[in-house]
Image (spheres, rainbow, N blue to C red):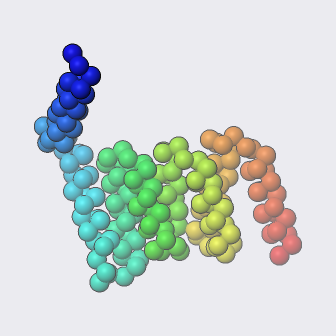
Amino acid sequence: MTPGLGLVIGGVLFVAFLLFKLSPFALPRDEHSQQARKDLAEAKRRSRDRSKSEPERATALREAAVAALEGLGRPSLAASYARRAEKLDPQDADAVGLLALSLRQASRFRALERFLWRRLADDTPGAPGYERAYRELLSLYEGPLRRPEMAVALRRMRSSRAIAI
């Protein structure tokens, strides 16, 4: 067999594989994932509707994130929707929690750490988003990042700041 013929056969097999994967018969989809796809599409449609207020669009993006995370098991996709929701409505503490959960499940711990520090820097102490970000950061250092000394330092800084104020 000539090298050119091998490439042609390989190309044909690859195209056949792609067509199979794109066909609706490739993998049977259960009702739960089909409903999640419908919910995701509906939430995306509502999030693009410019006649809605930013908090309403942020709610739709959070719903899309939940559908991607829980219904489809796609935490990276959920994180992108949760991040967009958080940018539209930064005062919503639920967006912080949803983004943290999505990034944790996607094992994107460094991205989560950067996001949480940014939230702490941009928000005011006592605000719901600030408190949620603080708790998530403590949990991150005590858990997956295995940096308990950072959690202790955060707690000490917070308690010394509370006394000074």
Q: Quadrant of the C terminus?
A: bottom right
Who is closer to the viewer here, 121 or 93? 121
In the rendered structure, the answer to whether residue 139 lies left or right of residue 86 reads: right
| Residue 27 visible in the picture | no
| Image coords of residue 19 (percent x, y) | 16, 39
| Image coords of residue 135 (percent x, y) | 64, 57
Who is closer to the viewer here, 135 or 33? 33
Who is closer to the viewer here, 101 or 13? 13
Q: Quadrant of the N terminus?
A: top left
In the rendered structure, the answer to whether residue 153 lies left or right of residue 137 reads: right
| Residue 143 visible in the picture | yes
| Image coords of residue 30 (percent x, y) | 20, 40
| Image coords of residue 100 (percent x, y) | 53, 55
Q: How many marks?
A: 0
Is residue 158 positioned above or below 69 on the image?
below
Please give the name of the residue rendered at 67% of the width and 75% of the height, measured from the top-left corner: 124
Please give the name of the residue rendered at 80% of the width and 54% of the height, measured from the top-left corner: 153
Taking the view exactly as shown, the residue that stands out farthest to the top is: 1
Please give the name of the residue rendered at 47% of the width and 74% of the height, measured from the top-left corner: 89
In the rendered structure, the answer to whether residue 83 lies left or right of residue 28 reads: right
Is residue 28 positioned above or below 108 on the image?
above
Please give the name of the residue rendered at 67% of the width and 52% of the height, measured from the top-left corner: 138
Who is closer to the viewer here, 14 or 134? 14
